[in-house]
Amino acid sequence: MHKLDKKRMSLLYKAVLSLKSEEECAAFFEDACTVQETEAIAQRVEVACLLNKGKSYVEINKSTGASTATICRVSRCLNYGSGGYKTVIERLEENNEL
């Protein structure tokens, strides 16, 4: 697999940042991703939020249906990743959306 094309990825990030409402975001993801891809991303965000609250893998698996492999990967990213999940969680908390 090729490394991520920086110019292409920058365009994607700018496209997402240009969205101004939840409705616009939903329309974009509906057009850009399969239902399964969007659901997988949504599940990972939910898993990250639950891990951040101190929930166990078993609790998270039962409430989200996420596999232990997915939970483990999200946990690793949450603890050792680039900080993306942490930023999203902080912003959701600031906006009382969690």
Image (cartoon, grey):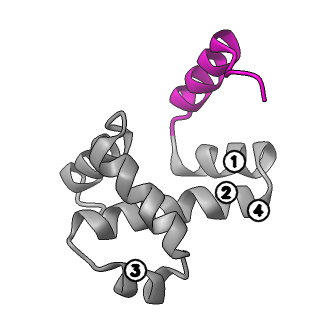
> What's the CA distance linking mark 4 and mark 1?
9 Å
Query: Looking at numbered disc 4 in the image, what kind of residue is underneath it?
Result: Val
Determine which quarter of the picture holds residue 59.
Answer: bottom left
Determine which quarter of the picture holds residue 45.
Answer: bottom left
The spot of residue 89 in percent (x, y) is 29, 52
For the point 80% across and 46% down, which residue is it?
Answer: 31
> What's the CA distance linking mark 3 and mark 1?
25 Å
Specify whether 2 is left or right of 70.
right
Given this view, does label 2 or label 3 mark the residue nearer the observer? 3
Query: Looking at numbered disc 1 in the image, what kind of residue is underneath it?
Result: Phe
Residue under label 3, please give it: 60
Residue under label 1, please give it: 29
Q: Are marks 2 and 4 in contact (CB under 8 Å)?
A: yes
Q: Is label 4 in a helix, a strand or a loop? A: helix
Magenta segment range?
A: 1-20
Where residue 38 is drawn, which disc sits there?
A: 2
| Magenta highlight on residue 2 | yes
> What's the CA distance linking mark 3 and mark 4?
21 Å
